Amino acid sequence: MGRPFTDRWGVPVQAASERGVVLLDEAIEALVALAGDPVAGAEEAVAADDELVLGHIYRAYLLLYGMSAHGVASAGGILKGLEGAGGPVGGRASVRPCTFRPPGPGPPASGRRRRAHDR
């Protein structure tokens, strides 16, 4: 499952190639700067390096950004595909994709703070 590379901020990112990490950095910059196309950048990063777990997670995040039912379903599909990836991850890629659950009706889960829109 690749090896650790360092992104432009000095954080280790698990990947198979440095090119994917560079493309992911550019996609993140596009979102932060509100310039360019972060979705296309994330797609390009994952196309360059399918083992770039953080690239898949970033794609899922961007799909959730629009808060549409289609985006939630697509993000869930991306993250479900990562469940069996296994292997050590570090830095910004240290997440547990299998904990993603689309929001649903009903009371908030125990241990979660109640928010204004939770009714």
Image (cartoon, grey):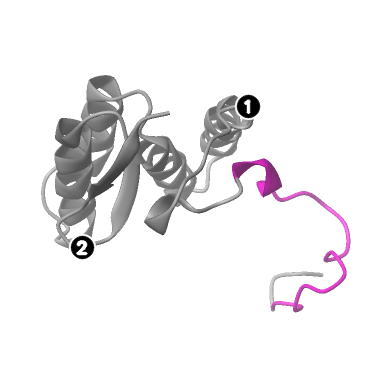
Q: Amino acid at mark 2?
A: Gly
Question: Where in the figure is residue 103, as x and y percent of width and height?
Answer: 71, 50
Residue 20 visible in image: yes
To which residue does mark 2 refer?
10
Question: Where in the figure is residue 74, as x and y percent of width and height?
Answer: 53, 29
**Residue in the foreground of this view, choosing between 27 and 85:** 85
Q: Amino acid at mark 1?
A: Gly
Task: Judge from the rendering whether residue 66 lies leftward or rightward of residue 42; answer left or right.
Answer: right
Query: Which image quadrant: the C terminus?
Result: bottom right
- The quarter holding residue 43 reads top left
Query: In what element is the residue under mark 2?
Result: loop
Question: Where in the figure is residue 34, as x and y percent of width and height?
Answer: 17, 58
Is 45 located above or below residue 91 in the figure? Answer: above
Task: Name the chief secondary structure element in magenta.
Answer: loop
Residue 37 visible in image: no
Q: Which residues are magenta?
A: 97-115
Task: Judge from the rendering whether residue 21 lies leftward or rightward of residue 73; answer left or right.
Answer: left
Question: Where in the figure is residue 65, as x and y percent of width and height?
Answer: 43, 50
In the image, which disc is placed on residue 84? 1
Is 86 located above or below residue 12 in the figure? Answer: above
Q: Residue at x 63, y 32 (%)?
A: 83
